[in-house]
Amino acid sequence: MKIDVLTLFPQMLDGFLSESMMGRARSSGLVDLHVHNLRDWSTNKHNTVDDRPFGGGAGMVLTPEPLFGAIEELQAEGTHRVYMAPDGEPLSPVLAEDLSQKKHLLILSGHYEGIDERARQNLIDQEVSIGDYVLTNGTLAAAVLIDCLCRFLPGFLGEEKSLTNESFQDNLLDFPQFTRPADFRNMPIPEVLLSGNHAKIEAWRQRQREERTRKRRPDLIENSQDEPGN
Ligand code: ADE
């Protein structure tokens, strides 16, 4: 899949996009990722891309000219244009999986007080929030979205079954994991994990998921139409 990111802070993405699994996915050609500096589409000699809001108030707003210029140049037939914004649709595994199936994503990260509403209404297909808090700009939010959706690309995780057993599947959090040593500083692991009895282990894990979810995130159970585990 191809992903273009449009930001005022391209360097914020340098490390993230070249390290670890994302770096491997890029060098293997699984993800064709390009980062663009919105300032390159500035239409004035001072290279500015923002201005004071009409009606007064604090902060600066990204002006329409560079946004229209950049997006019109970077988009192609079938491009899905996403704007990262705190008032967007909340990011979820379902949303991430859906976006991972697009052929070409163009992700715009805003900043300051936001972007001119005419750009939002005419250039953007979907607005996404990574949580109910406000970041100084949307570049980190774009990184979070990219990381989250790339996990759904076939071949990205290597072992595809890693996706089947994790938090938020079936509206439940994940179960606790243990590795060697089986007894560390007088803290033994739950015995059932040493039993070799897969049915018992699965039942224990399922109970742990349900208990954890009830304790830490009861909203996941309350807000789901399904019963936990369905
Ligand atoms: N930009 C600033 N805050 C954000 C958030 N919570 N989600 C997405 N984009 C943002």
Image (cartoon, rainbow, N blue to C red):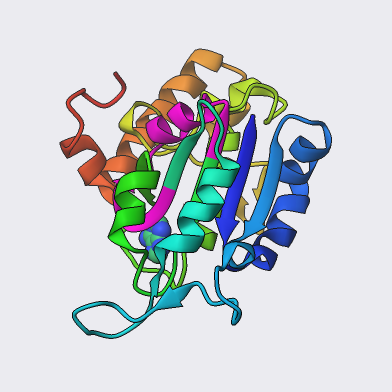
**Picture layout, residue 87 above or below residue 159:** below
Nearer to me, 52 or 31: 52
The quarter of the picture where the N terminus appears is: top right
Magenta range: 83-105
Nearer to me, 101 or 214: 101
Observer able to see residue 181: no
Query: Is 97 covered by the magenta stretch?
Result: yes
Observer able to see residue 126: yes
Give the image location of residue 178, x and y in percent: 61, 42
Q: Residue at x 69, y 42 (%)?
A: 33
Q: Residue at x 44, y 44 (%)?
A: 82
Q: Is residue 207 left or right of residue 8?
A: left
In the picture, residue 222 is in which quadrant? top left
In the picture, residue 228 is in which quadrant? top left
Give the image location of residue 212, x and y in percent: 35, 43
Give the image location of residue 119, x and y in percent: 36, 54
* Quadrant of the displayed image that contains ligand 1: bottom left
Nearer to me, 208 or 105: 105
Q: Residue at x 64, y 64 (%)?
A: 40
Give the image location of residue 45, x and y in percent: 61, 79
Q: Is residue 115 left or right of residue 219?
A: right
Q: Is residue 173 left or right of residue 76?
A: left
The quarter of the picture where the C terminus appears is: top left
Point out the residue furthest to the right here: 27
Q: Residue at x 46, y 62 (%)?
A: 65
